[in-house]
Amino acid sequence: MLIQMKKASDVLSSEITRKSFYMNRRKFIQAAGAVSGAALFPSIAPPAFAASAKLENVQKSQWGGSLQPTSLESIMSHNNFYEFGTGKSDPKENAHTLKPKPWTVEIAGHAKNTGRFNFEDLVKPHQLEERIYRMRCVEAWSMVIPWVGIPLASLIKKAEPTGNAKYVAFETLVDPKQMPGQRGRSLKWPYVEGLRMDEAMNPLTIMAVGIYGEELPNQNGAPLRLVVPWKYGFKGIKSIVKITFTEKEPPSTWNKQAPQEYGFYSNVNPDVNHRRWSQARERPITGEGGLAALFAKKIDTLKFNGYAEEVAHLYQGMDLKKFF
C-alpha cells in the first residue's frame, strides 16, 4: 500500500536554500571548524564552456516553478565530486583542469544506433528545459537546483534500444591529468552508475547541461551529467563519456564500494537509514552561512524526495528496505 506524500510542488520556500549562501562555502567550512555515430544527430557549433556562458533558447518547464532555488554560488561551491577531491570545496578549487570541450559520448550495448557522438550532436536536436528540482544528498542535506537539460528519454529514443535493454549504464571520464582526484584510491575509477530502463525513461529523469541558465560548471559535472531527483545525489553521475544499454543490472560505484550502505536503487527514503546515520530528517542549506547554516533547522525527509506521485508506481510491490 502506498503512503500519500506531498507533491514536489508543495515544497515551501522556507525549506529552500538562498542563492547568496553557496559561494560563501569557505566561510561555512571555517565556521564549522570553529565549533561534500554522428550520423544519428545533426551537428551544431560547439558551445563555449565559460563559467558564465549563457544557454540559448531555454524553455521554462512545469517543474518547480514556485520554488526558491539555492544560490548559484552555493551550488558551485559545495559538491561531492571525488575526481577532484573528497572535500566539499575541492571540486571548485580543482576542477579548472577539466577540459569539457571538445567532448564525445559513446553509445554502446543493446541499441540500434551506437557509436561515438559529439556532445553538441547529442544535445542540439532537443529543446533545452529548465527544471527546478529539490535535491537530497545521502549525507542528509538538501538544496533546490534550477537545472537546464533534456529528458534522458529523448536520447534513449534516438538510440533505439533493443528488447534486450533492461538497464542503462553510465561512465565518467578517466583522466588523472584533468581529474587529479583520480590519482588517489578514494574510489575505483571510472565512476559508474546505472538505472533500470523504466527509471531512465521517467519524465523526471534528465541529462543536465547547465544550471541557472548557464552552461554547467566543471565542478558540477560539465558538460553532461545525470539528474534523477527522487534518488540520492550520488546517483547523478557527472562528466559522462559513455552510455551503455545492458540486459543485466550494471555496477554502481558506491554500491561496489560499500554495498551494505549504498544500494543500487538509492531512492530517497526516510524509512531506510544509512548504516551510520538516520535518513529521516535533512538540513536544507538555508543561505545564512556560518554557524546559522551549520545549525539550520532540520526538516522531515519525504519519501522519494517529494516526487512520490510521479515515481512510486515504478516500485509497486517491491520491498524498498531490501531493494534500497
Image (spheres, rainbow, N blue to C red):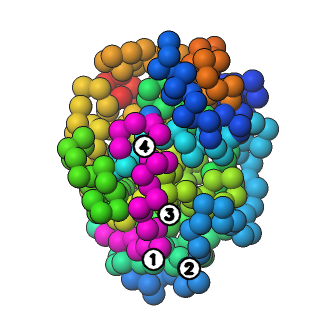
In this picture, residue 158 sits left or right of residue 6: left
Q: Secondary structure at mark 3?
A: loop
User: For numbered disc 1, what is the local secondary structure?
Assistant: loop
Residue 34 % position (x, y): 50, 16
Residue at numbered disc 1: 102
Residue in the foreground of this view, choosing between 292 and 190: 292
Q: Which residue is mark 3?
A: 223
Would you say the residues marked 3 and 1 are in contact, meaning their CB atoms lie under 8 Å apart? no
Image check: 114 left or right of 96? left
Instruction: Assign a secondary structure to mark 4.
Output: helix
Mark identifier at residue 90? 4
Residue at 75 percent across and 36 percent down: it is 68
Q: Residues within 10 Å of mark 1 (few under 14, many from 20)?
A: few
Q: Which residues are magenta?
A: 85-108
First in residue order: circle 3 vs circle 2 = 2
Q: Position of residue 7 (x, y in %)?
A: 68, 30
Task: Please name which of the two marks, 4 or 3, marks the residue nearer to the observer.
Answer: 4
Cα distance between the residues tagged 4 and 2: 28 Å
Q: Which three-letter amino acid code belongs to the residue tagged 2?
A: Pro
Q: Which residue is mark 2?
A: 46
Amino acid type, label 4: Asp
The three-letter code of the residue at mark 1 reads Pro
Residue at image coords 36%, 20%: 274
Residue 303 in view here: no
Closer to the N terminus: mark 4 or mark 1?
4
